[in-house]
Amino acid sequence: MPSSQPVTVSIARTVQHGYHRQFAAWALAGQELAREWPGYLGSGWVRNNLNSNEWHVMYRFSDAETLRAWDDSHERKWWIDSSGGLMEITRVEHRTGIEGWFDQPGDVSITVPETVVPPRWKQAVSIFLPFFPMSLLANILLRPVTADWPLVLAVLLNVGILTPIMTYYMLPLSTRFLRPWLQAPRKARR
């Protein structure tokens, strides 16, 4: 891809049913982050129709080098990670020239996305696996202290202790351990 030409990236994303407003807000946040980035020329997104779960997100940079800098930036990584399972990337295309905004591409390179958003049931399993033993252990250890407490206060203490442990240690460990299973491509429905 010539480095002196503007480059448009077109990404097809399938949004989880019922999360279109959240996705639009997420996409707008990404636009705001990119707006100040060197070489940024613009971005936007469209849906095929009102009932479609597929959205096409496009962003444009002045050349391949500034695009690469944005794609590799900490800001973009933080933004992508903040999607929270709203969508799954189904196709990525890099286009050069004016056709990147309008016509079929003259110069297209299609790349397979590196990550797959796991289905919600897999996300639930990856949370349950560390949460159950941690919750059981916390209840056993806290019972001598909270036995005479009102249930609301005992649960509040338990949740207050477990939330940071789960968020900063156990869930990252669980998702790292289960990554091959979580990131396995989804099978097509018949």
Image: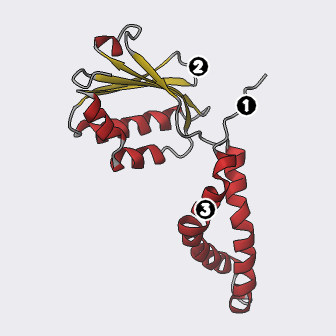
Local SS, label 3: helix
Quadrant placement of the C terminus: top right
Q: Residues within 10 Å of mark 3 (few under 14, many from 20)?
A: some
Q: Residue at x 69, y 79 (%)?
A: 138
- In space, the residues marked 3 and 1 are separated at their CA atoms by 25 Å
- The residue furthest right is 190
- In the rendered image, residue 171, in percent from the top left (x then y), is placed at 60, 62
Task: Kindly identify which residue carries mark 3.
Answer: 171
Local SS, label 2: loop
Where, by quadrant of the figure, is residue 54 drawn?
top right
Question: Mark 1 vs mark 2: which is more N-terminal?
Answer: 2
Relative to 141, 112 lies left or right: left
- In the rendered image, residue 163, in percent from the top left (x then y), is placed at 58, 69
Q: Residue at x 53, y 46 (%)?
A: 84
Q: Amino acid at mark 2?
A: Asn
- In space, the residues marked 1 and 2 are separated at their CA atoms by 23 Å
Q: Is residue 99 visible?
A: yes
Q: Disc number at residue 51?
A: 2
Q: Is residue 101 visible?
A: no
Q: Disc number at residue 187?
A: 1
Question: Mark 2 vs mark 3: which is more N-terminal?
Answer: 2
